[in-house]
Image (cartoon, rainbow, N blue to C red):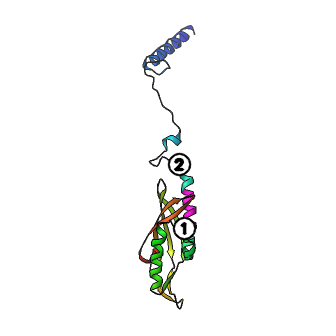
């Protein structure tokens, strides 16, 4: 029994000496220093936002954009200043006035709307807006349909800009009549 205890003690001593000299025991020669940082710090992107802040901003962008699109779809030109930036409103109204001069107006009907923030940089963002377009043009005199749109599934890229406390539509980029 004494031989077995001595043999085990010698083996344990050899293992400990081996571990100590290879740096596997604290105080050994091969200590590695590791810098520990939080996940939030490592997740910062080019815009300098951490994921939680970016998520909150994206939610505000989506909420404001949905509300802005609702105002736009109603066709109430008197309330468009709530939805459009100061720069975009006159440009858009020029297009609408031209349409009215042609004796037409647009009735906007969008179904199955989906919004996705696709880009975010400082006070500007891009939103992909997809929907089924059931819109049509009517005569301003008779209110009868003069043209139906032929793009059932449509997509508009919306540029929004922060003005005050709201994100407003700065640009609508889509196919032909889809952005009127």
Above or below residue 73? Residue 5 is above
The boundaries of the magenta stretch are 58-69
Q: Is residue 46 magenta?
A: no
**Quadrant where the N terminus is found in the figure:** top right
Residue 23: x and y in percent read 45, 20
Circle on res. 51 = 2
Above or below residue 45? Residue 20 is above
Residue 42: x and y in percent read 48, 41
Pick whichever, 62 or 83, lies toward us.
83
Residue at left 55%, top 61%?
Answer: 62
Categorize mark 1 by other alpha carbons within 10 Å: few (<14), some (14-19), many (20+).
many
Residue 106: x and y in percent read 50, 81
| Residue 18 in view here | yes
Residue 31's quadrant in the figure?
Answer: top left
What element does badge 2 sit on?
Answer: helix
In this figure, which residue is indicated by the disc labeled 1? 83
What is the distance, in whole Å, between disc 1 and disc 2 at their CAs? 27 Å
Pick whichever, 112 or 99, lies toward us.
99
Above or below residue 165? Residue 114 is below
Q: What is the residue that sits farthest to the top in this orientation?
A: 2
Residue at left 49%, top 55%?
Answer: 123
Magenta span dominant secondary structure: helix
User: First in sequence: mark 1 or mark 2?
Assistant: 2
| Residue 148 in view here | no
Residue at left 53%, top 51%?
Answer: 54
Categorize mark 2 by other alpha carbons within 10 Å: few (<14), some (14-19), many (20+).
some
Q: Is residue 66 magenta?
A: yes
Circle on res. 180 = none
Check whether the beta carbons of the residues at disc 1 and disc 2 lie within 8 A of each other: no
- State which mark lies toward you, 1 or 2: 1
Residue at left 51%, top 36%?
Answer: 37
What element does badge 1 sit on?
Answer: loop
């Amino acid at each position: 029994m004494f031989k077995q205890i001595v043999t085990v003690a010698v083996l344990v001593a050899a293992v400990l000496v081996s571990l100590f000299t290879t740096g596997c025991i604290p105080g050994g020669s091969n200590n590695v220093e590791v810098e520990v940082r939080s996940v939030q710090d490592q997740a910062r992107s080019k815009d300098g936002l951490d994921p939680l802040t970016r998520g909150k901003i994206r939610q505000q962008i989506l909420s404001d954009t949905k509300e802005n699109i609702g105002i736009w779809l109603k066709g109430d030109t008197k309330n468009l200043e709530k939805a459009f930036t100061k720069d975009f409103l006159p440009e858009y109204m020029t297009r609408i006035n031209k349409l009215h001069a042609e004796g037409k107006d647009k009735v906007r009907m969008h179904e199955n709307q989906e919004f996705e923030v696709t880009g975010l940089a400082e006070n500007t963002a891009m939103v992909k807006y997809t929907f089924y377009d059931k819109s049509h043009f009517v005569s301003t005199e008779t209110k009868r349909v003069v043209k139906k749109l032929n793009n059932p599934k449509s997509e508009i890229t919306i540029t929004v800009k922060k003005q005050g406390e709201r994100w407003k539509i700065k640009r609508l980029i889509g196919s032909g009549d889809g952005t009127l």
